[in-house]
Image: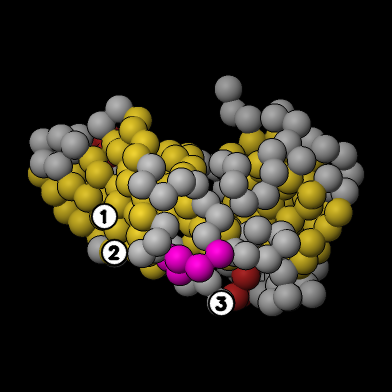
């Protein structure tokens, strides 16, 4: 059974139209991450939550926001998607940071038209 | 700045061949080394999380070694099968308080039947 679920698997949005990607987990993990991965590049961490504490990466554009209303759910909001935001977005969870394995969802492939 | 590098970038082998690839990372302030397998259309899946110098871990036909003093880890696949075709990613947490994972670019393995 999937333990980290991302919806939708594929999302097409219009240039500049806000879009929200969702992630849920059944593992009760403390940490939830959002990664962006573009073709042939390493996954890039956008931000993570440790419980309710939000940790933004310094180079994450302001266009990207996140919400974690409870332990199970985390959302990625892209306020005004640009063509450069087309990518695979991966959600992951872990019990703690660093030394514990991460569990990933299947990702959402975002296309901006 | 923590750089995690993987080689080779891609690899094609025949079914039954054994293969290995490398992950290198700065050896100072080492905390942990993660290996993940990412098959097409699936979630990245953790293979190993290694912390001790000289450690060797095994899962079926896949094993990994760790040298924290010289800053490298090898992943070995014995008797490769087509189902082993995937991208193999390694990651190591940085030395900061948040221990975020720094990812390599991955090794893309194709096993020909």
Front-lying residue, B24 or A24? B24
- Same subunit under labels 2 and 1? yes
* Residue marked by disc 3: B1
Among the 4 quarters of the image, the one containing residue B95: bottom right
Task: Tell me the residue at 50%/68% (across/down).
Answer: B28
Residue B51 vs residue B99: left or right? left
Task: Tell me the residue at 14%/49% (across/down).
Answer: B13
Q: Which percent across, then down, holds residue B84? A: 28, 39
Of the image marks 2 and 1, the number of the one nearer the N terminus: 2
Q: How is the image coloured?
A: secondary structure
Q: Which percent across, then down, holds residue A35? A: 62, 58
Give the extent of the magenta segment. B25-29
Q: Which percent across, then down, holds residue A68? A: 84, 48
Can residue B111 be seen by looking at this rendering? yes
- Depicted A34 relative to depicted A100: above or below: below
Q: Distance of mark 2 from mark 1, alpha carbons?
A: 6 Å
Tell me the element at label 3.
loop
Tell me the element at label 2.
strand
* Residue marked by disc 1: B21
Q: Which percent across, then down, holds residue B64? A: 33, 43
Of the image marks 2 and 3, the number of the one nearer the N terminus: 3
Q: Is residue A84 within the magenta segment?
A: no
Tell me the element at label 1.
strand
Mark whose residue sits in front, 2 or 3: 3
């Amino acid at each position: 059974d999937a333990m980290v679920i991302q919806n939708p698997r594929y999302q097409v949005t219009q240039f500049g139209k806000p879009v929200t990607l969702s992630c849920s987990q059944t593992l009760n993990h403390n940490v939830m991450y959002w990664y962006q991965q573009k073709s042939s590049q390493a996954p890039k961490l956008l931000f993570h939550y440790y419980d309710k504490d939000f940790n933004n990466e310094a180079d994450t554009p302001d266009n990207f926001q996140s919400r974690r209303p409870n332990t199970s759910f985390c959302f990625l909001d892209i306020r005004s998607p640009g063509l450069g935001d087309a990518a695979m977005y991966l959600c992951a969870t872990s019990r703690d940071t660093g030394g514990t394995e991460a569990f990933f969802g299947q990702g959402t492939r975002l296309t901006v038209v | 700045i923590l750089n995690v590098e993987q080689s080779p970038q891609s690899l094609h082998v025949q079914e039954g061949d054994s293969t290995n690839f490398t992950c290198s990372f700065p050896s100072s302030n080492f905390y942990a080394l993660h290996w993940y397998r990412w098959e097409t259309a699936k979630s990245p899946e953790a293979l190993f999380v290694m912390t001790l110098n000289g450690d060797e871990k095994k899962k079926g036909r896949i094993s990994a070694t760790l040298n924290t003093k010289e800053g490298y880890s090898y992943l070995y696949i014995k008797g490769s099968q087509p189902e082993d075709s995937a991208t193999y990613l390694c990651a190591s947490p940085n030395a900061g308080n948040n221990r975020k994972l720094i990812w390599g670019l991955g090794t893309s393995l194709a096993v020909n039947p």
